[in-house]
Image (spheres, grey):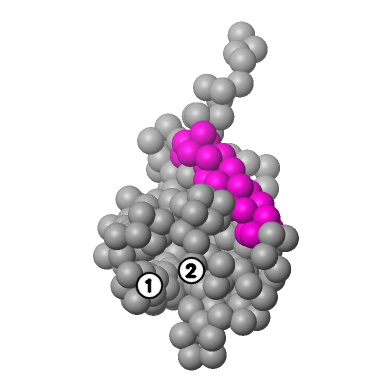
Amino acid sequence: MSSTTLAGDPVFEGVYGPFSITARDRREVLGYRLALLTVAIAQAGLLAQWHWLGSAALWPWLLPMAVGLGLALRWIHIYLRPLHRALQLFWLVGCLGFLGLGLAVGPGAMATSLAANGRWIWAVGPFFAALAGIGFKEFFCFQRAEAIGVTLLLPTALLGHLSGLLQASACGALLAIEAALLLLLTLRKFPMPAAADVGDKSVFAYLEGQRQPSKA
């Protein structure tokens, strides 16, 4: 048991031994859920503003999306560290892509340039790949229909725009559905116990022990 475990912390039997869900675990889970909710609200706000008010001044929505997704990837629990690091790398590359887009065309023209020139998807696409990766993780762990919707609809819309196979209206409709599903996914997570998002900590401990050189 960790030295931070308290008497009241729930104890579970894992694959490689017992483990506890500590106060720190619960704080990280709450942080993950709030960060993902921030992404969902910001994405929905961006799409709503784009639909009803036009494409000008959309870039402020990207700030909470970037910070929220970065924090969500900081606190998410994924057994495979290479996959976790890959999602974080996608997030970083995508953020740099948005920065490059803003520097190239100006913050106010980012949305119109992205809509007019699908090749910008190569720059910002990794950001949404990281978000789709979270959707896949959520579906793999909890089999929620809205999670697989996020996983499939987001890349479908972006690749459809990149390839020119989907019209702008179809891409917008797919993104709107995906944003609604992401918001539903995040809201449904809050009543869940923290242990559901933490997973089996004994597996994390086992994998960490496998990575460290033996002291025997």
Q: Which amino acid does label 1 sit on?
A: Ala
Q: Which mark is residue 184?
A: none
Q: Which mark is residue 115?
A: 2
Report helix, strand or loop for mark 1: helix
Q: What residue type is labelled 2?
A: Ala
Q: Which of marks 2 and 1 is nearer the N terminus?
A: 2
- Please identify the quadrant where the C terminus is shown: top right
Q: Which residue is drawn at 56% across and 29% down?
A: 208
- Report which residue position mark 1 lands on: 168
Q: In this view, does 128 lie above or below 54?
A: above
Q: Picture coordinates of residue 30 (x, y %)?
A: 57, 65
Q: Is residue 156 magenta?
A: no
Report helix, strand or loop for mark 2: helix
Q: Residue at x 65, y 80 (%)?
A: 57
> What type of secondary structure mainly makes up the magenta span?
helix
| Highlighted magenta segment, given as a residue range | 79-101
Nearest to the observer: residue 56 or residue 213 = 56
Point out the residue furthest to the front here: 116
Q: In this view, does 141 lie above or below 145?
A: above
